[in-house]
Amino acid sequence: METHTQDLIREAEAAALVGLAPKSLANMRSRGGGPPYIRLSRTAIRYSRRALTDWLKERTVHPGGAA
């Protein structure tokens, strides 16, 4: 997936977009299972809006769906 720099957002904005605390995203980065991210440097983490949207879609549960 191609990522454009204008699509990249900082951790706090990404956390707000997905409804989590920034600390939760940090924990997911270290433990795995979180949304994809881009590490620009040791402390500069960015998220793609598109990747976050896709990540949320992958986790959507449809109640009453086939098991």
Image (spheres, helix red, strand yellow):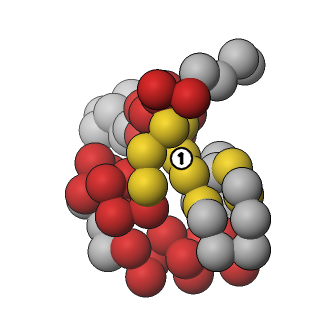
Q: Nearer the viewer, residue 41 or 15?
A: 41
Badge 1 crowding class, 10 Å Cα cut-off, few under 14, some 14 to 19, many 20 or more, is: many
Establish if 26 lies above or below 60: below
Residue 39 in sight in this render: yes
Q: Position of residue 51 (x, y in %)?
A: 55, 33
Q: Quadrant of the N terminus?
A: top right
Q: Nearer the viewer, residue 65 or 47?
A: 47
Residue 66 in sight in this render: no
Q: Which residue does the image show at 38% across and 53% down from the upper left?
A: 14
The three-letter amino acid code for the residue at tag 1 is Tyr
Q: Does residue 5 appear to the left or right of 14 in the view shown?
A: right
Q: Which residue does the image show at 56% across and 52% down from the upper left?
A: 46
Q: Position of residue 16 (x, y in %)?
A: 25, 57
Q: Does residue 17 appear to the left or right of 40 in the view shown?
A: left
| Secondary structure category for the residue under label 1 | strand
Determine which residue is flagged by label 1: 47
Q: Position of residue 12 (x, y in %)?
A: 34, 64
Q: Position of residue 67 (x, y in %)?
A: 52, 36
Q: Does residue 64 appear to the left or right of 60 in the view shown?
A: left
Q: Which residue does the image show at 38% across and 74% down from the upper left?
A: 22
Establish if 11 lies above or below 51: below
The part of the image, by quadrant, that contains residue 28 is bottom right
Q: Nearer the viewer, residue 9 or 23?
A: 9
